[in-house]
Image (cartoon, helix red, strand yellow):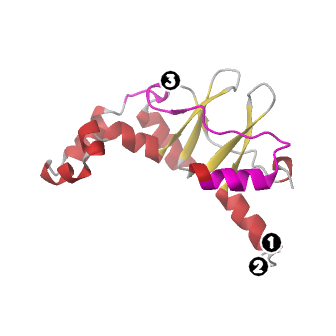
Amino acid sequence: MLVKDIYLKNFAKASPEASVYDLVKLSTEEKTNGIFIVDDNNHLLGLVTIFEILKAIVPNSLKEKPELARATSVGLFLERVNKKRDLKAKDFMLQEPPKVYLDTKLIEIAANSLQTEHYRIPVVNENNQLIGVVNRSILRELIAKELKILT
């Protein structure tokens, strides 16, 4: 089976100028933890997930030594959220996320996902324009159908 047989054509996307506020709002409205960052021609530039947002919010010193967080103020997290609300996607997005094409085999996606921990993989055309997404939920449902758990 190939990507073209199972990919989703509905996905959240935003401009590289979108702020943390914009991205969290879109993520909440679309009920997704991943937003693809594209240019005006729909070329894939990057990906923002809650992981990238948290990395932008949490101070570097605490990323390196999480045990130091115990000594910080109770309100530090929310202070940092407000401090970073206008940070642009282009400044913290995951650049060049792994991507696949319509003719990619599903076994390639499964094997690669075990190496990278990426939960949503952009599907692009030959011009690097975003046309869809494959995620682990799709793979789970495909496995369930093959095992006759779902019809």
Q: Which residues are magenta?
A: 86-114
Residue topped by disc 1: 145
Whole-Å distance between the Cαs marked 2 and 3?
A: 43 Å
Instruction: Report the amino acid beneath label 3.
Output: Glu
Disc 1 and disc 2 in contact, CB within 8 angstroms: yes
Instruction: Report the amino acid beneath label 2.
Output: Ile
Residue topped by disc 3: 17
Disc 1 and disc 3 in contact, CB within 8 angstroms: no
Name the image quarter holding the C terminus: bottom right
User: In the displayed structure, would residue 106 be above or below residue 102?
Assistant: below
SS of the residue under disc 2: loop
Q: Which mark is residue 149?
A: 2
Quick one: label 1 or label 3, which is nearer the N terminus?
3
Name the image quarter holding the N terminus: bottom right
Name, please, the residue furthest toward the top: 40
Quick one: label 2 or label 3, which is nearer the N terminus?
3
**Mark 3 residue crowding within 10 angstroms, few (<14) / some (14–19) / many (20+):** some
